[in-house]
Amino acid sequence: MTIKEALTTLPQYILPHHALSRMMSKLTHCENKTWKNLFIKQIIRHYGVNMAEAQEQDINAYKSFNHFFTRTLKPGVRPLTTEANAVACPADGAVSQAGAITDGEIFQAKGKSYTATDLLGGSVERAEPFNNGVFTTIYLSPKDYHRLHMPLTGTLREMVHIPGRLFSVNTATTHSVPGLFARNERVVALFDTEVGPMALVLVGAIFVSSIETVWHGVVTPPSISSVQSWRYQENAPTLEIGAEMGRFNMGSTIIVLFGNNKVQWDNGFKADEIVKLGQMIGRTLV
């Protein structure tokens, strides 16, 4: 951790994370045309958003900033891999980390890790299938497409909403805050796939006003004080590889977990790699 990273991160410990995020939610859902158009233009200009990929390119057509932020893409701009046994990238973004879950530990940054048990809400039962498996952490910046899609076809088994802080999930904070992704509020979706259990962890962050899934709708807000779970048995939804499964209403991070000897990441799929939704990032092994 550098001095600059420390100075960027330390004020976050005292900030009222959820209050600020509630305020941001009101701003991003505001339908005042002048305000929302100004906000959209600033984000496009500052972050270099590629509006040529958007299904709707006229910013006047978006009723709010959030409507713009969760925009759909033109058909065909994110082709889904057709390789045999492929694992598809679940989001546009940058790979924060990708590697092995070693004795239940997940690598965050140099000198920092957290446990799969903590990430999945303190449940040893939920974490056990992923012991000595593989993980990847993908960060979505403000310029990215903010809908999340399935890496493999899966049938939903359980969804878990886990309370926590809302630290930023940018590089500086990832390098500075111990156990960051197991401290922030998050939504875990556990699927049964052809290679066994798959966990998709949607991690909240400061100013991330909402996390949604396609089967439930808005999960957060409101924030909660204890872990809440929903189990799906009868009529459990099955989502195909590449299908939308959720979205961030503002940017954040998705973490993907697979079990031991189930998936192998591609050699080029590593930290700091820029990735696109639907591209092949690994192969199933069984």
Image (tube, grey):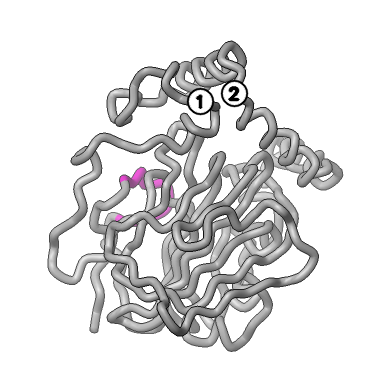
Residue located at (46% from left, 21% from top): 44
Which mark is first along the chain, 1 or 2?
2
In-front residue for pair 71/259: 71
Give the overall secondary structure of the magenta segment: loop
Which amino acid is tagged 2? Glu
Find numbered disc 2 in the image and state the secondary structure of the residue it sits on. Answer: loop
Whether residue 275 appears in magenta in the rendering, the answer is: yes
Crowdedness near tag 1: few (<14), some (14–19) or many (≥20) residues, C-alpha within 10 Å: some
Q: State the mark number for residue 63.
A: 1
Residue 98: x, y in percent? 42, 61
Name the foreground residue: 92 vs 228. 228
Residue 111 visible here: no
Q: CA distance from mark 2 to mark 1?
A: 6 Å
Q: Nearer the viewer, residue 286 or 189?
A: 189
User: Could you tell me if the residues under marks 2 and 1 are in contact, i.e. CB atoms within 8 Å?
Assistant: yes
Provide residue 267's location: percent of width, then percent of height: 27, 61
Taking the view exactly as shown, the residue that stands out farthest to the top is 34
Q: Is residue 260 magenta?
A: no
Q: Position of residue 250 (x, y in %)?
A: 56, 39
Residue hosting label 2: 31
Residue 281 numbered tag: none
Q: Residue at x 65, y 64 (%)?
A: 182
Q: Which residues are magenta?
A: 269-276
Looking at the image, residue 60 sits to the left or right of residue 194; the answer is right
Residue type at mark 1 is Lys
Helix, strand or loop status at disc 1: loop
